[in-house]
Amino acid sequence: MGIKLQHIDHLALTVHDVEKSTRWYCDVLGLEHRYPGLWGGIPAMLFIGETGLALFPTKVDDPKPAPGSDTIAMMHFAFRVDRVNFEAAQEHLKGLGIPFEFQDHDISHSIYFDDPDGHQLELTTYEL
């Protein structure tokens, strides 16, 4: 029978400043900070529905930059939105001064942008 997965529970990210990144993900993407007092606040657990991000502090003052396509690593992570929210997200990011890149993937449209630590995010819609 194999394993029957339900969904991705969370992604674990290292960040320079957990508090700053928590505010960014809540303010920019509307994630909810759940269990803020648990484990001394580390990791910060942020959710949208059942999808979570766990933010951990980096253990060094000058961490290595995010890897590129020449490294075995996560390149980006994506959130799906409907067309209305895809358009609204672009206006929201513009208003916050966050640059993004639009890409037409034939079956979907996406915008790509970085969080404060250089993690690349994607918002994608299949409603063309």
Image (cartoon, rainbow, N blue to C red):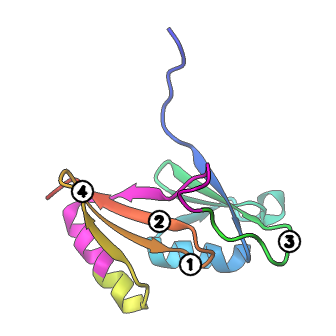
Kind of residue at disc 3:
Val
Of the 4 image quadrants, the one containing the C terminus is bottom left
SS category of the residue bearing label 1: helix
Instruction: Name the mark nearer the viewer: 1 or 3.
Output: 3
> Pointer 4 and pointer 3: residues touching (CB < 8 Å)?
no
Q: Nearer the viewer, residue 111 or 66?
A: 66
Kind of residue at disc 1:
Trp
Among numbered discs 4 and 3, the one appearing first in the sequence: 3
Identify the residue at horizontal 44%, vertical 74% (top origin): 113
SS category of the residue bearing label 3: loop
Cα distance in 3D space between marks 1 and 3: 21 Å
| Left or right of 35, for residue 27 | left
- Verify whether residue 76 appears in magenta: yes
Among numbered discs 2 and 3, the one appearing first in the sequence: 3
Image coordinates for residue 14, horizontal then vertical, percent = 71, 64
Cα distance in 3D space between marks 4 and 3: 37 Å
> Pointer 1 and pointer 3: residues touching (CB < 8 Å)?
no
Instruction: Name the mark nearer the viewer: 1 or 2.
Output: 2
- Verify whether residue 57 appears in magenta: no
Judging by the rendered image, the residue that carries numbered circle 4 is 105
| Quarter residue 85 falls in | bottom left
Mark 1 neighbour density, 10 Å: few (under 14) some (14–19) many (20 or more): some
61 shown above or below 84: below
- Magenta-highlighted residues: 68-90
Cα distance in 3D space between marks 1 and 4: 27 Å
SS category of the residue bearing label 4: loop
Q: Mark on residue 60? A: 3
